[in-house]
Amino acid sequence: MSLNSTAFLPFLLAVFAAAALGGPRWRWAVLLGATAAFCASLGPPSLLILLGSVIVESWGFALAIDRVQEPARTRLLRLGVAVNLGALILVRSSGAVAAIGASFYVLQVVSYLVDVRDGVAPAERHLGRYALFLTFFPKFVQGPIERAGGLLAQLNEPRPLSAAEVAAGAKLVAWGLFQKVVVADRLAPLANAVFDDVGRWHGLPLAIGTYAYAAQIYFDFAGYTDLALGVGLLFGVRLTQNFDAPYLAASVAEFWRRWHVSFSSWLLEYVFRPLQLALRGARTWGTPAALLMTFLVSGLWHGGRAGFVVWGLLHGLYLAVSLLLRRPWARLLASLRVRGTAVARVVQIGLTFHLVCFAWIFFRASSIADALRIVSNLGGGLVASVGAVARGERWDTLLFLGQGRAGFVFAIGLVTGAALLRPLFRSATLVEPPSLSRLWSLARPAVYAAVLYLLLFAGTATRSFVYEQF
Amino acid sequence: MSRLGGIGGHGARLAVFFVCLELAARIDDAVNYGAPLFSRYDYWTLLDRDDGGVPHNVPGARFEKWKINSLGFRGEEIPTAKAPGDRRIVCVGQSESFGLYEREGGEWPALLGRRLGAVRPGVRIVNASVVGAGRRSREAYLEKYVLPLRPDVILLVTNPYNEATAALQLAEMPGAQPPTVGGGGTIRAAQPRILRKLRLRLAEVVPERVVVAVRSWWLRRRVREAERTTLAGYPALDVLPEDAVASFEEHLRRVVRRVQRMGARPVVATYPTLVDSSNVARYGNHLENERVWNVRLSERGLIDAAGKLNAVSRRVAEDLAVPLFDAAAAVPRTTEFFADGVHYTDAGAERVAAAAYETLDRAGALGEPGPLTLREATSER
């Protein structure tokens, strides 16, 4: 049972009813039971066995760390991290179904053990609440990666359900589903047309396929996250926000403050900072080296495929180079008298977006050879294909990628609509209503109707989420 | 006052929400099916009656996957004039041949046409079936709508449930009005289209058992209502009376001769039904839908009618020495092939098309073969 499956809605309603009847005191038990049922629906019993082992073992490690003093604390921490990362590497490399969600909950275990060692979070004594913290069903498969100070604290102090939270949660669930099953899944055929048959294309189609994938992966992952956040709100739980209009970032560093935030902040805290500290002797090259290594880890976390590693290294390289060129770049903008202007920001947003898209090619392509062929053919045929399109020639192939005009225009319309309508469905705080202009307020019922209609009748057959594989 | 204003505001927003939902449904229909935005759009716009009361398809009409060509037949356009050397095989049936549950282009006459297209390029299948058409108008329909096509072969498909009911009606009420076909006056342009879409979507996501149970309950209600208004306290018949059987036989013989007089070669078909006495315990609930339209016969009566009238079709074909298309023997009686008591799934339509091809081929009704055999054409595809 996936969050976008038809079986999930009745499941969610049943859990909501049970949680509402059970009240705050027993909510953890209802949610834990629901999580067990959800996980059982995902895979074989080995998934539950692995999950149970990780829960009990990491819970025990945290309690043990909490009881001893340094240097035993750090030794225990290292052992705990090694055991969990070892388990992660083992199940991921085996390709077993039991690996579902492991990349996310193991990172959560690591951060929890570190936080307990550092005294940032107390060791949780209640095994049930700890198990729920690790595996809470809406975030189990794809995160967000939660910190003990956020989610565990909320589970320990449950509040009565509020109508505002439930209403905001329901709205977010609908919006998340819309982004996934209507927008992302409509973009998938465009991206797949290019990436599944790389040798067929030259120039513009490769660019369109790459843009389509950039949009697909965003709406897919952001859709999942909003769905998870919405489900959390239905039970009075506020999960971490993972996306904040990442393609409007004016630098790659800003992109990572807006994209998969729970993961990037985890990397910053538990990989980059220790590395930066360790490499501080290398002066100018220390931080860039730490960035490269951090994003190498990021690539490896996605899997052993060379494309993921190159994708991670590219991002590390972008950040390292931008750090090294920060001053010359600032001087260049100042000399052009555009520093801090809207023009400079627009140019930087465009540049950042294309750097990110370039890295997506390696992330999505089936092999490095395919990715390199895309890069080579993209540059080679771009002028000719743009010229042909400008002359009105071969639009069906060059522009619509053989998917038909209607499908292409519909996909563009959906992306534009989803970008414009986002403020109607989620405010910055999620629960408080967004401040809208009078026009938007008046248009709101019409927009809700349109989104609901598209959700019900324009959704594609269920596709799995892109990040489910990690 | 402000409370009232608040309630009014919510009410207005709710009204705007539903109006927009309906508008979205209409725009969707307009974009995907070329449906009119503000006038009537439903299944029954496909059908009409002419001045003589003969039900026929409306030329150029379209509702969702169902498209009527400019001559008033389901399927692709066909030239009005028949080219020399061309052969036209016209299927004259009801909803089972017109197509209901199959994917677009998956109704059996269309499948038969595609099978023939590769191996017999000069042979064209015309699907002249009309939903709900029956005995009262069959001969007039053949004269008015089928004869102008200059058909070489006419494949006659008769629904035994409807034929039995028609025979009973004629026997008991000679002056009775024909049953309503098309022009469903209760359906108005203002009827919300979103409701039908929601119902269909709901049926897709709700477990099949629930859908079957709800549908069964609804059909039982309709059957009870029909029994109350039609049977007036008399029990439904468990056995189709012999005079009704004889009446159908006389009608079928007359139609076959009429087709022969038209210069076409008739092919008489038996009629596949899902339920017979061997599987009634398993699929009996599928007869509820048939009983809504044929309430004079009980479930046992329907099974009896299907058996008897199919036997009549076989006998008439043999007596008059015309080819028999034994469709009833070609389709296994399971829900893999039937979507309800008489309508086919895609798999069922495939079976019927294959059987029809064999019958026509064996009967020499296809004319000279083309350059490829069916097997060769299929393997080339």
Image (cartoon, helix red, strand yellow):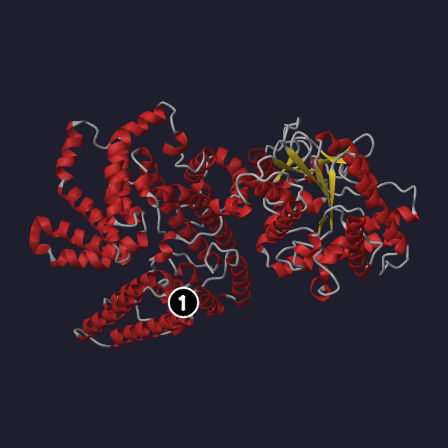
Three-letter residue code for mark 1: Leu
Residue A64 visible in the displayed image:
yes
Q: Is residue B292 visible?
A: no
Counting from the top left corner in percent of width and height, residue B328 is at: 70, 54
Q: Is residue A28 above or below residue B189?
A: below
Q: Dot 1, how many residues are within 10 Å of its Cα: few (below 14), some (14-19), or many (20+)?
A: many
Q: Nearer the viewer, residue B122 or B54?
A: B122
Q: Quadrant of the C terminus of chain A?
A: bottom left
From the viewer's side, name the closer residue of B41 and A267.
Answer: B41
Query: How many numbered badges does the structure rendering display?
Result: 1
Residue A361 image point, x, y percent: 28, 44
Q: Position of residue A405 (x, y in %)?
A: 45, 33
Q: Residue at x 41, y 52 (%)?
A: A224
For the residue labelled by badge 1, is the local secondary structure a helix, a strand or a loop? Answer: helix
Q: Nearer the viewer, residue B365 or A156?
A: B365
Q: In the picture, residue B136 is in which quadrant?
A: top right
Q: Is residue B28 above or below residue B308?
A: above
In the picture, measured across the screen, residue A187 lies left or right of residue B167, that is left
| Figure check: A354 above or below A75 | above
Residue behind mark 1: A132
As drawn, the residue found furthest toward the top would be A391
Residue A49 image position (x, y, % from top left) = 38, 73
Specify the subunit that label 1 lies on.
A
The residue lying at 79 percent from left, 31 percent from top is B50
B43 sits left or right of B177 in the view: left
Asked if A223 appears above or below B118 in the picture, the reply is: below
**Residue at position x 31%, y 51% in the image:** A261
